[in-house]
Amino acid sequence: MNVSVTDRFKVEHATELYGLEGWGGGYFAIQPNGHLAVTPRRDSSQGVDLYEVVTKLRAQGIRTPVLLRFPQVVVSQVERLTGAFQAAIDEYDYPNRYAPLFPIKVNQQRAVVEALLDGGRPFGIGLEVGSRPELLVAAALPLGDEALIVCNGFKDKEYLASAALATRLGRRVVVVIEKPFELDAVVELARRQERMPMIGFRLRLQARGSGLWERSGGVASKFGLTTRQLLVCLDRLQEVGLGERVSLLHFHIGSQITEIRKIKNAVQEAGRVYAKLRELGVDIRYLDVGGGLGVDYDGSGTSSDASVNYSVQEYANDVVFGLKEVCEQEDVDPPAILSESGRMLVAHHSLLVTDVRGAIAGVDPTPIPLDGDESQVVQDLAEVARMISVKNYREFYHDAIDYRDQMYQLFNLGMLRLDERAKAESLFWSVADKAVRYSKTAKFTAEEFLDLESRLHDKYICNLSVFQSLPDHWALDQLFPVMPIHRLDESPSRRASLVDITCDSDGAIDKFIDRNEIKNALEVHELIEGEIYYLGFMLLGAYQDTMGDLHNLFGRVHEVEIVQGEGGHEVRRVLRGELASDVLKWFGYAATELIQGIECALEEGVEARRIAPEEAAGLLDDYRDRLAQYTYLD
């Protein structure tokens, strides 16, 4: 996006620059004062000013980094998903219903799960669990009468016994057989229990997904039964009198499916298997199409790894129409449809705000003046810097590389002074800066100049841990929208990559969303001394909460739950981040033991007269206070 220097930078320009309308889902807007707002009701006139929120929180002692949650966004997403399926059911005259399942693994936070259940109860929302602890949580939550608990994952006797317990408690539980060896445990459970859960099968389809999680599906998947295994399991269940408990068929071809064609293929294949099982007399009532409904993180609406080339409505249409078409061809009753669309339901509801602590300046392209007695290689670089132009920038940049390499060889042989090295380096980066600017006049910019440009950018130091708060970016190069939350009525004059405060070079963000390509720098504002500059990291509600780690012992950040009312917003819940003592305890360092260690060291210091007794008491108090502090920069 280009804004003429004669035009005033407006919030409309910022909206376009940062792509809000593409990835925001209607939940973000820039206010006339240049502040970013969250609009939980998708009404831009009723927004929660994020800068105002963090400013008030700071005054109350809750400093950034802070994770902001908006439970109303979760409810809105449930309504959006169920509304899309109901519209498809109505349009195609589908003679059955749809109900969403929320996979607890996507976000296990109680506030998130309870918001989903409250908002989804009218639509029969259920839960998908993948472990015994998740099942124990699901069994205790206030589910609706028709809501299902679908049990996936590896199952031992205790897991299955927990499923039977939940059934006896009145829950509608489905145990999904995903591996042949689970069958014997299910049969053994039936011998011991009077009330059995319902039984489902997970298919291992030939169809597979697309994107970063493509390996989750296909014939080489970690989970699922082959056709032969499915038939063997079915025969065994019928032999022992459990055939009537089979009620669900499930498949999952991966998270964040980027191409709608992949979903169509999977639905058609699974629909055929469902129909053939019905023809065999198996009374399957539910078809669980699994996860995969993606989120458009970069706003491009394409099949890139950070986007999807379909809408929620198109997804619902293709699932409903695909199943109806197959069932009509096979002359069987269509199933009730379930989906595990967890990412779509919760990704938008949370974001992280943190402060920028400073900038590591990019290479200064201003050359150091020469005094005339420099070595020839330095003078050659100066000549290149003087003569480079839009017509010769590629050739002259390559010449500069040769002269730079010669300079380092001469320096290592002791033939150059230190000041000559500094001047040569300065001249080289002056040439590089000019070459990058000239390269932008070409129709296509060569890759070497794109890489070179990234080396000239500033690095903004952000008060966060990428490993704790954005683990998918570190592990998978997953892109998340990032932008300032204020000063959005000012033109950003800098471009920077971001680095965190860990002692690890992987703690960096140097890939940013764009409608047309992945950017290697983010448009940011000049830092103003004495003023806090805040950045927001968006769409963090799926998986990031529970997958973060404690690299460098940076712990869980502050969390704040915010709701929008008629008279403004309300902070409904504050969960303070982990203190240093909390994090240390995870690794076996109890605060009392650490304090004892300090006390011993101080006693030795006093006895050796290295420390005065009154000073020792103050040092001990200081240490205690620091154990009770937030793990991030103050």
Image (tube, rainbow, N blue to C red):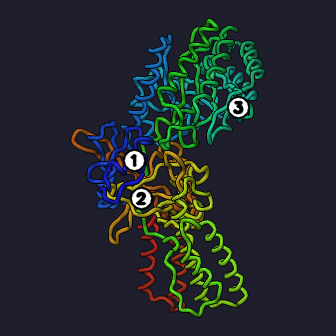
Q: Nearer the viewer, mark 1 or mark 2?
A: 1
SS for callout 2:
strand
- Residue 390 left/right relative to 218: left
Q: Earlier in the sequence, mark 2 or mark 3?
A: 3
The residue at 49%/45% (across/down) is 515
Query: Does 378 sit above or below residue 161?
Result: below
Q: Residues within 10 Å of mark 1 (few under 14, many from 20)?
A: few
SS for callout 3:
loop
* Residue designated by label 2: 354
- Whole-Å distance between the Cαs marked 2 and 3? 40 Å
Coordinates of residue 269 in the picture (x, y in percent): 66, 21
Q: Which mark is residue 547?
A: none
* Residue designated by label 1: 16
* Residue designated by label 3: 218
Instruction: Residue at the far top: name it.
Output: 331
The image quarter containing residue 182 is top right
Coordinates of residue 21 in the picture (x, y in percent): 40, 41
SS for callout 1:
helix
Q: Earlier in the sequence, mark 1 or mark 2?
A: 1
- Whole-Å distance between the Cαs marked 1 and 3? 38 Å
Hey, what amino acid is under mark 1? Glu
The image quarter containing residue 378 is bottom right
Circles 1 and 2 in contact, beta carbons < 8 Å: no
The residue at 39%/33% (across/down) is 75
